[in-house]
Amino acid sequence: MTQNIPKAPPYPKSHILAASGVAALLSLALLVFPSREVEAQKTFLDLDLGNDAEMVLQEKDDLRAGLPVPGAASPFAKIEQSADTAENSAEDADENLLETADTPPPSDPNHHNITVSNGDTLSTVFAKVGLSANDLHEALNSHKDAKQFSRLKVGQVLEFELNEDGTLKNLQSKLSDLETIRLSRTDNGFDFQRDQVKPEVVTTYSRGVINSSLFLSAKRAGLSHSLTMDLANVFGYDIDFAMDIREGDEFEVIYEEKVVNGKRVGTGNILSARFTNRGKTYTAVRYTNKQGTTSYYNANGESMRKAFIRTPVDFARISSRFSTGRKHPILNKIRAHKGVDYAAPHGTPIKAAGDGRVTLAGRNGGYGNTVIIQHGQRYRTLYAHMQGFAKGIRNGANVKQGQIIGYIGTTGLSTGPHLHYEFQVNGVHVDPLSQKLPMADPIAASEKQRFMQLSKPLMARMDQEKATMLASNQQ
């Protein structure tokens, strides 16, 4: 059964026409006359992209991160400003934009700065600026020192200047803060130049207390790796840095610092130092005598240098001591251990303990690769299980104290990379850790006064610097 639904009474035709006309007029008005609020929002967004772009973008980043933005009540505070203020700001911003806009200088197609990347060679760098292999060959063969350009480092910048015809006019590179090299084309090829800046040398004081390792404490005190090694070498005759260092030990150093235009570009020599190890303080002063020989002496003029250094491997760990009843780790039976084992990574340098002559540099049974050095009539040292020998180390060669003679390895009967070190006096094995080492000569009597005129002010400065540093730390 069909249900009849009553229809709404029809509107008069004149009413419908009037309503359509009003709607059309309203649409036209909105298109021609946008509201002030919409205009204000549009003007503000134009400002964001103009003079204040960086500030607004930063504030948006801060808001996303949940950080407060100074002077902003909400993320939309600026959009809510009045249309009049926005319009005035727009005019001001347009004027500032015209005044402060940076117009980048036109790039010079004949100048190229190339930063060396991983895997680059001089050939690939030349190709990046449109130079051929012939150009490269001509430049490198123009001067015996020009080949230095081929020793590239990642991050190094090469500056090219080309002629109008695309050939190389100038090439230069800053090797360091102190050195720049360049090639300049002349009528006869290329001219090589090396510009070296002479730095200002100033003296600097540094102090540190060891709470973990010497290297970490020295780094916190501002010392470079090379200065830390120098410090260890200065006191290496009295302190075994593989065994003797304790928490609470402290050091002080006065050293040379190289400065160019207020920037530190390197370090020089240690002029004086103090090292307190297990409550005992050692001092060192650098002194050059009238014959031009430089060495370190303690504050009273006694030589820091002894006939033998205490440890032939820097910062190694003692893995086995001198013993007459140790069980051999491989042979598994009691056998005297007539030396000291220093565990260190493969390839760690091994130094000669003193001046002498090499009597053996070769394979030696269970010792593996071995060096034996004779020091005068009474003393002999042995270095075993080496990975290999340093250049020039052979039978009959003369070596100096501290000279590298080989590298840590595991040759022979060895369970891991280490140095087996033996010390003999008149043919008898002794413990190198407890043996009293012979002293070197002190300052000559004729130079003692001159030395003390250098030593006393350096020691006094360290006292003063330390007192000032401790006082400032207590404030």
Image (tube, rainbow, N blue to C red):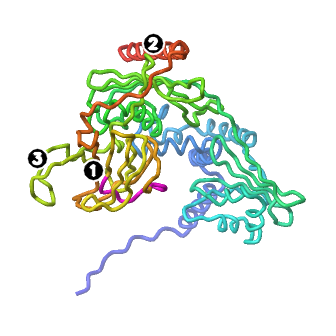
In the picture of the structure, the residue carrying the numbered disc 2 is 464
Q: Are marks 1 and 3 in contact (CB under 8 Å)?
A: no
What residue is disc 3 on? 325
Q: Image height check: is 191 above or below 424?
A: below
Picture coordinates of residue 136, whole percent (x, y): 73, 66
Residue 395 in the image: above or below residue 460: below
Discs 3/2, front: 3
- In the image, taking residue 315 as reference, residue 284 lies left or right, namely right
The residue located at (20%, 43%) in the rendering is 321
Q: Observer-nearest residue: 64 or 420?
A: 420
Marks 3/2: CA distance?
A: 51 Å
Left of 467 or right of it: where is 248? left
Q: Earlier in the sequence, mark 2 or mark 1?
A: 1
Instruction: List x then y, in percent, for residue 29.
Output: 63, 55
Please indicate, yes or no, whether residue 36 appears anywhere in the rendered image. no
**Quadrant occupied by the N terminus:** bottom left
Quadrant in the picture for residue 31: bottom right
Who is closer to the viewer here, 70 or 30?
70
Residue 387 falls inside the magenta stretch: yes
Circles 3, 2 touching at the beta carbon (< 8 Å): no
Label 1 sits on residue: 420
Which residues lie in the magenta part? 384-393
Image spot of residue 432 (x, y percent) = 27, 39
